[in-house]
Every structure is written in C-alpha cells, then in structure tokens.
Amino acid sequence: MPAKELLVPTLICLVFLALAVYVSPGGREPGDNGIKFIQARDLVQNNYQSFQARYKGLPVDPTYKYFPMANLPGYFIHKVGDAYYYVFPIFLTIVIAPLLQLLGVQGPYLITTLPLAGLIFLLWHWSAQLGMRFSTRLATLLLICCGTAMLHYDLILSEYGLALALTNSALFLIWKAIRTDRLALFILAAVPFGLVAFVRQETVLLALLLPANYLLFSFREARVWQAVIAYGLILTAMVAMQFGINYQIFGVPLGLRQLQQMDEMGQGFLQSRLAMFIEIFFYGRFSVGLLAAFPVLLIAAFQYKKARTQSQATNILALAVLGYALLIPLATVTYQGVGWGPRFLLVILPYLLLYAMQLIDGALQQQKHALLKTITYTAIAYSVTGSLIAANLMIFSNRLLQYSHRYIEQHSRPVLIFLQPEMVTSAFGFHDSKYMFTLRNLDDTADLLQRIRRLHQDSVTFIDHRGQLQTKLAELQKKSGNRLQTEQLLNWELRGLGGDLLNARIR
C-alpha cells in the first residue's frame, strides 16, 4: 500500500487513540468492564493458579454470607462448588492479566485499541481491492469507525476490539482465497475463527456458514472439499480445546456462559426468540436496532441487482453474513442485545456495511444519481450522529461513576459495608485494596462487626446510595449492640448520583 494510501487510516487511528486516552476510565468502570478488571486482578493475585474470585473477608466468612459480589446477577458471577467465578471468558482474562501486571491500569486497553487500529487499515485496504471509489471508501470507513458501536467499544475494556479484528481478518482471508483461487488462505482462515471463538462463542456459527456457502457454489470441485475438510479439522480442534479447558475448570464445556444461557432459556422459546429478533433489528438498548441504526442497509437492499454482478467471493461472504444475522436470534437470549448494532452482530458489521456501500458505489459509478448520493450521505450522517450521542452518554455516565469511586476511596475506612447489595459496583475500582462486605439484613450487624474485629480491623465505613443513613443510624446502633462509635457522616452527590458515607469505629 503506497504511503499516500496510508494517510487516511493513520489519521483515523490517531483520532481513535487520542479519544481513548482522553476518556480512559483507568480501570474504574461499571458493570461488565469493571468485572473484567476484577477478573484480571484476581488472576494476578492468585499467582495465575486459579480463576476463583478473591474475597478478602473469606478468613472470617467462609460461607460467603457477606460477600458483596454474591448478589450480582447470574450474568456476572456464578458459584461453582464452594467458590465463586466471574462469567466472562477466562481466555480474555489470560490476555488481560499480564497487560495489567506489566503496564498498570492502562495496559488492558491495548486489547481494544491495537486490534481496532489493525482493523481500520484492513478495511481501507479491502475497500481498495473491491474497486470502490476514493470518496465512497472514505465515507465507508467513517461510517464503520464513527457510526457503529466500534466507537463505543474503543472507549472501554472489552473483547470486541479483538473479536472484530479476528473475525474480519478471517473474512478477508476467505474472500482473498476464493477470489485468487489460493485455497491455503481459506484453510488459514480457520485459525482466526478458532481464536475468536475463545472470547465470542457465537462466532462459531459464522465460521460454519462460510464453508457451507462455499460448497454451495463449488460443490463439484474435489479440491474445495479438501480445503473445507482441512478448515473444519483446524476449527474443530481449536473449539474442542476450549471446551476441554472449560470443562476441566467449571464442569461445563461452554464455561460459565453456558450456565448463564441455561438460566435465561427458562423463558418461553418462541417468545424469547421473537423478542431477540425485534431487539436486534428494530429496537436495542438505545431504542435503535440494526436496520434503524444503519439506513444504508435499507438503501443497499434496493440495489439488489448489483449483487448479481459481484464476484463469487463477495456473494459467498454476503450470504454467510446475512444468514448469521438472521440465525443469531435463534441462538441467543433476549437480555443480551445492545443498540447501535447489537453486540452479537457487531463482529459482522464492518463487512456488512462494506458490502452495502459496495453495492451503492456500483450504482453511483454507472450513472449519476444525485438523489441516491444525497440519501446515502444523509444516512451515514444519521448513523454517525447517533453513535456520537450514545458514546457521549456513556462517557458522561462513566465520569459520574468515576467521581463516586474517587470520593468513596478518599473518604472511606479500610473496611466498606454496603447497605444496598446492587450498588457494590461503586467499588469496582478498588475492590482489592479494601475489605468489602454487604449487609443484606440489619439484624446481622452485630455478627458482621464481630467478624471484622477478628480481622484486626476496627474502623469501618457504611455506604448507603439512597441517602438514608441519617434515618438508619439509630437502628444500626441498636442492631450493633451499641458497639458503633460514629465519627463522620458524609454525603456526596453529582447530578443525581451519590449517597451517604458513615465512618465509624467498632468499640
């Protein structure tokens, strides 16, 4: 690729990098991403010997009665035997933990930013290989980078940067293999597909659809069958390796995600699948589903005649990607959809949008279509605007939570006692540096304080995110057997987010 060609993807990568550095939460993230940090820290502190969730209060609470994380929903943590484990793929934790240990809290974000940078260069190169005009290539890259959830996931700790890069690298290898008749590249594509399955198991469905489609187009060619069999053996071996490791640790081949899926499968089958289908295509978390978020897909649908003129390689990939989008609602559960390109479809969005823009570009090249051009660029502007709004809302929300994290950390004692179990995420940023307990029933106050004294600690902080500690003081004192000496009652609030801190000493 000539140096001049590298300018566009380089500039976009620099913008992505600057944005990621500017808004970096530095390990103080809520929900899924905060727990991924906790998993990595726990693995490091376990000397890479166990994925078990660490609990500093375990010596005095062996039954996990006051373990704060025990109250998190099943899509965060599960109890296996006598120990708790977080549900996110352990293979992602294995990658994140060394980065955290070697580079500090910013290190794990490399798992997102570097693969996304590679993906940007790949898409720019791929669009040139497809013969698209420069203006359309630029518009396509801006749409994918700034108009999809790629922008959202660049700013948080997530496996999606890795999943996007691996999945679309595999798609490119298959496209190149079919186009140039180099079947070794097709076989090689099984490796990135096998790797991405370690962190996003649903991508196995896409990995199976591609060789099936290839056989539909080349059913009579023996060498194609040989390539598909070799591809299948590599993919099977890598997936089997994942199953074996998960089964050895958790007793289930798909890992703790399998337990999570089984819990959610309790819903009515047809009802839950219909809900997921609607969410993926028409609704989503930000009230926008796949088709509503990307009107260029609807515009491209009217260019279906151009699909007949596309290469066999392009059509094989397009059929597999579209089939994956239609089948995913049958294989997933309702709660997991996310707007701006539901996350189960995020891995195929780059190619799906690239294909859509390729069809539109073909129409624009044949004759002048001023109206089509205007509609297309308006649709792109719509997607980019929506994605920017969603990203800003996320940044704003994370900033509020980071403020809470810092306030609690600076004003609390070595022992934290949460009075609302659901708000334990307020301490994700420093869960390993303080003793943390959840008091689910005030009648257990005396028992918990007695256990804390056995840790040789007598200074505690009660946290109430509903701002009701003032009214609970008398009851707390009574339930503790008058063993609490109140030192300081603080209240913090920032734009509706806050609560009360009560610093006290155990007599």
Image (cartoon, rainbow, N blue to C red):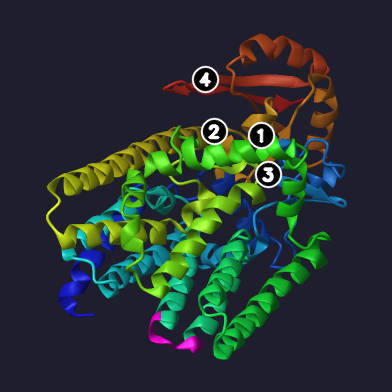
Alpha-carbon distance for marks 3 and 4?
31 Å
Do the residues bearing badges 3 and 1 touch, measured as CB atoms within 8 Å?
no
| Residue labelled with disc 3 | 75
**Earlier along the polypeptide chain: callout 2 or callout 3?**
3
Residue under numbered circle 4: 491
Residue for point 35% across, 62% down: 307
Element under label 3?
loop
Q: Amino acid at mark 2?
A: Ile
Task: Residue 339 in the image: state x and y as whole percent.
Answer: 47, 40
Answer above or below: position of 347 versus 392.
below
Q: Which residue is mark 2?
A: 408
In the image, which is nearer the foreground, mark 3 or mark 4?
3
182 in the magenta segment:
yes
Q: CA distance from mark 3 to mark 1?
A: 24 Å
- Mark 1, Cα crowd under 10 Å, few <14 / some 14-19 / many 20+, is many
- Between residue 261 and residue 110, name the one nearer to us: 261
